[in-house]
Image: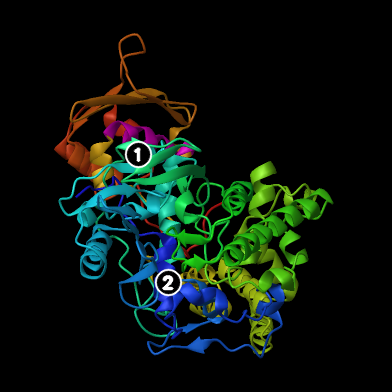
Amino acid sequence: MHRFPHRTTIGFVAALMLSLASGIAVAQQNYSAAEDAPPAAPIAPADWRHYNANPEFQPSELPNGSVANLDSLARATTVTRFLGELRAIKVTDDTWMIGGDVYGSTVLETDEGLVIVSTGSSGESGRGFRRVIREQISEKPVVAIIYDHIHTARGTEMLLDGDVAPIIAHPDHNDIAATSGGASNPHMPELGPHVDARAELHLGVHLPASGPDALPGGTLDFTKESAWMPATQTVEHGETISVAGIEMQFFHAITDSEEALTIWIPEKRMVIDNAVWPFTNTYTLRGDRFRDPRNWIAALRQIRDLQPEIILNVGSGGAPIIGRQACEDAVSALMDQMAFIYDQTLRLTSQGINMNEVRHRMPLPDSLLASPYNNEAYGQFDTFPLANPVYNHGWFSGYAEDMHSLPRAAKADYLLELAGGADKVLAAYEVAMENAEFLWAKELAAQLYYADPANQAYRQALADVFRRLGQMSPGSIARNFYLSAANGLEGNDVISIAGVQSAAWVTANPAQAVEFLRIRINPQLADGVEGVLLFDIDGNVSALHVRNSIAEFVPVPDTHYRQPDGHIQASAEDFARYFRGEIGVDDLLDSATASGQAEELLDLFDPYERTPLYPYTRRSP
């Protein structure tokens, strides 16, 4: 099976929504009649008052001890299909969706065989889908695979199980698969491991299997092996082709992935898509490429204008939507919610409202919240707005007070002195906790922690308020960040937002690994030093030119550039161990051939360390 250069992860939506869904009992017996269900009552989205002036709120406690706010998830489950065992859900006489998995396949039966859209998040998923198809749908061979986007394309080899079929995808699919092997596809590839590490918090990977901090469905193994196979055929935007006798028109869409496909089958008035999500996440707290709401709205508008009578969302576990009005209602609700948040963010920003305050001034109208598609079970609405002005003009709000700031530790020292000492701040924290003013309590506890990170009482105070905030958060992403932070403060030092590429990635990309070393140069150590360090990693030759406290990557060093001042010849395996912080410079040089100033130049680069999210010492500014 194919191995990605970073560890392979199942989709974030799949992992979190599946785990949360398993913690609540919501029946979904008749998906085709979903549009007949009574409308869900509107609920106000979470905002600062939910966290800071809501003493009556009580989260739910589940059988595994998990304590969570399930209000939004209960609404989302009315429009999803991921609950229960893997099974075939009949949509029409020749069309099925696989339930029990967020990325369950859509199966179209033709005279020639089966057309499959989405193969799942891993080889294990593909194997399970194959079993359901054979047991509940058809024994016909698979004659075509369609990838709707990268997250749903990782079960192919196991789903085919020897069948030979063309694989149809967006023209950029194979390139994206090659460059986003980990959890992320960032604008800056050097930050991929960092975003992957943030994704571990996003997913709650290090939370316990039971007790109040557990995921409602237990812990998750998101490192399952991929069975991705490359696309063999691509389709242009608007192109119509016949797939096993079915006329299909393909439209490119940009949602949570830049190479999604919307599939239109005119004969069936059917859309298969990765846009009509049963929940929302137009900004992801883990970080990654900017999700421009305009692109997502455009993808939804494309679907709306087709006027479908059936919508099958393979990208995020939506239940089949049957009926023209039901399709229009779902698409319009999502479009309008995204447009409201985007437009109001720009309206308020253009009025001069500090972009950090915008989210406090734009409650969603009840008319939007009436749709079960507009829920906060995954992403929370208040986390979306800030991404838009930041994308336009960066971190600076335009207000002078935001331009420069004290280091956190220095600020904490000043504020504790102003308050009359740490004891008074701790007493104020305890009052805030008793009054359910959790955001205020968080601010106070944070000052205590940054003033004295090793103080166990202060660490526990901040952990306690993070835990309460997590238990109140309707969105699984926010909950997992809060609870991961609490566990980190309480001593789980594995929890970190530092990350590094896998050994497999380093050995497969030794020159790029050398290039990425440049962001580890320590400017204090490199001050006044100049030299060229040449690397020969299993015959892959490249260099770093150190000067002015930077390291310029030289991909093809030769005599026309300058002679190296140091030379290292090492195996890819040993270099990978050094790159990942498993061995130091001395150990690498003991196993390598080195000459010149190799050791002195390599000592200028920081070794990789997975530092705890909340260290026990004050970080130097």
Instruction: Read off the residue under disc 1.
Output: 174
Three-letter amino acid code at disc 2? Arg
Q: Amino acid at mark 1?
A: Asn
- In this view of the protein, which residue sits in the foreground, 87 or 509? 87
Q: Secondary structure at mark 2?
A: loop
Q: Nearer the viewer, residue 227 or 329?
A: 329
Is 517 a magenta residue?
Answer: yes
Q: Looking at the picture, how far across and down is residue 182, in whole percent?
A: 36, 50
Quadrant of res 515 = top left
Residue 496 image-quadrant placement: bottom left
Which residue does the image show at 30% across and 19% down from the upper left?
564
Colour theme: rainbow
Q: Label 1 vs label 2: CA separation?
A: 28 Å
421 to the left or right of 12: right
> Which residue occupies 48% across, 38% down?
524
Upstream in the sequence, badge 1 or badge 2? 2
Which residue occupies 30% across, 67% down?
221
Secondary structure at numbered mark 1: helix
Q: Locate residue 45 relative to residue 617 in the image: left or right.
A: right
Q: Which residue is mark 2?
A: 81
Front residue of 232/349: it is 232
Residue 186 lies, with reference to residue 552, above or below; the image says below
> Magenta stretch: dominant SS?
helix
Mark count: 2
* 94 versus 399 height, above or below: below
Query: Horizontal placement of 582 versus 549: left or right?
Result: left
Estimate the x, y position of residue 292 in percent, counting from the top left.
Answer: 60, 47
392 vs 373: above or below: above
Segment tinted magenta in the rendering: 510-523
Q: Quadrant of residue 590?
A: top left
Label 2 crowd (10 A; few <14 / some 14-19 / many >=20): many
Is residue 259 visible in the rendered image? The answer is no
